[in-house]
Amino acid sequence: WNALIACHDMLRMVINDQGQQQILENVDRYVIPRLDISQWPAAKRKEHLDNIRHELSYEVRPTDHWPLFNLLVTQFEKKRYRLHLNLDLLMFDVQSFKVMMDDLAVFFYQKDTLSPLEITFRDYVLYEKAERNEADWLRSWSYWQSRLYTLPPAPRLPLSEHPADKAQPPHFTTYQSVIDKASWEALKKLWQSWKVTPSAALITLFAWTLERWSKWPTFTINLTFFNRRPIHSQVAKLIGDFTSVLLLDFDLTSSALSLRQLMERVQARLWESLAHSQVNGVELMREIGRMTGQSDQPLMPVVFTSMLGMNLDGLAITEALTNFLGDPVHVFTQ
């Protein structure tokens, strides 16, 4: 793990008091704590593993202190271990997890060092900043400027009548559902005949569901997409957060539209927004915050993320994240 830290500068990243990322040149040697519970009764072992999972899943590490990650190892059988990782998404996107695991495998099996990369995440950020003087970026900025004043706010969703104690950290609950393969293939085939992608179809259904609960039928949500632009042959080997944000607005006031028509409208709006994605939605939210005087508030807190059809180096995501450490037992993001 220390070889990985030396290899990837973003693993030495903190956030300074100006809100900027800072790469520390030198950091302390990271020691991964290891606990052997292999002799404990089965019920007590399970309870301990569950407790670690719960504790790590709600741990928020201070961003101005290194490290922004936490690793623990539990030996729960004679030759079986559980690696617990708490990784801050300020440093990672989904491709970064594969980079991390691939490089760990190199160090583990070959016990060798990796050649230094010719590009850093900082180089990528500076490249994007330099683009702001180019015609494509300026056209996208002009497009969004013309729309900022007409973008509706976030969905006004009902709040609990008994709000939680603000002094307590928020609690997140993840719900999961699985659709059978035959039904999913049939849906994709139907949507394809409408020239609608699965992600566009699902975001339409997501918005349609939100509208049932929202105070107003017009609203804007965040759509995340992974945007590693191939400015260098080694960009795919970088660890960093390359996630971009699109602001996608919905107007569900008309009940005359069929579900197909609504999906087709969303797909068209999505293509239009992607054509102007040179400007990150984060910048647009800052601009809206300045315009409205709400720069300290989360303006668009409802987020939709889809990785359908996405692959990592030619592998499906589930295959790419199955590695020499074994299969992921539990994945939780918040």
Image (cartoon, rainbow, N blue to C red):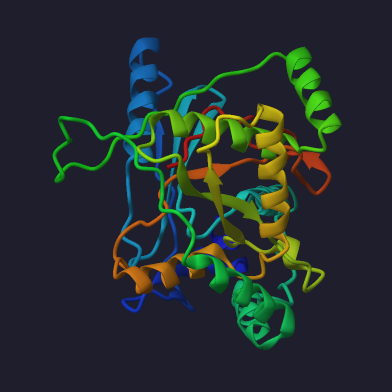
In front here: 155 or 123?
Answer: 155
Q: Against 175, is 157 above or below?
A: below
Q: Against 282, is 329 above or below?
A: above
> In the displayed structure, does residue 42 sit left or right of residue 126?
left
Counting labels gives 0
> In the image, residue 54 lies at what x, y percent?
34, 31
In front here: 229 or 332?
Answer: 229
| Residue at the image point whose x is 73% and y is 63% from the top | 275
User: Which quadrant does the C terminus fall into?
Assistant: top left
In front here: 31 or 90?
Answer: 90
> In the image, residue 139 lies at what x, y percent?
68, 77
Q: Is residue 2 visible?
A: yes
User: Which quadrant does the N terminus fall into?
Assistant: bottom right
> In the displayed structure, does residue 127 sit left or right of residue 26?
right
The answer to which image quadrant residue 196 occupies is top right
In front here: 209 or 35?
Answer: 209
> In the image, residue 48 lies at what x, y percent?
34, 24
| Residue at the image point whose x is 66% and y is 88% from the top | 133
Q: Is residue 96 visible?
A: no
Q: Against 47, is 157 above or below?
A: below
| Residue at the image point whose x is 59% and y is 30% from the top | 205
Residue at far bottom of view: 133
> In the image, residue 111 lies at what x, y percent?
70, 55
> In the displayed structure, does residue 154 sit left or right of residue 113?
left
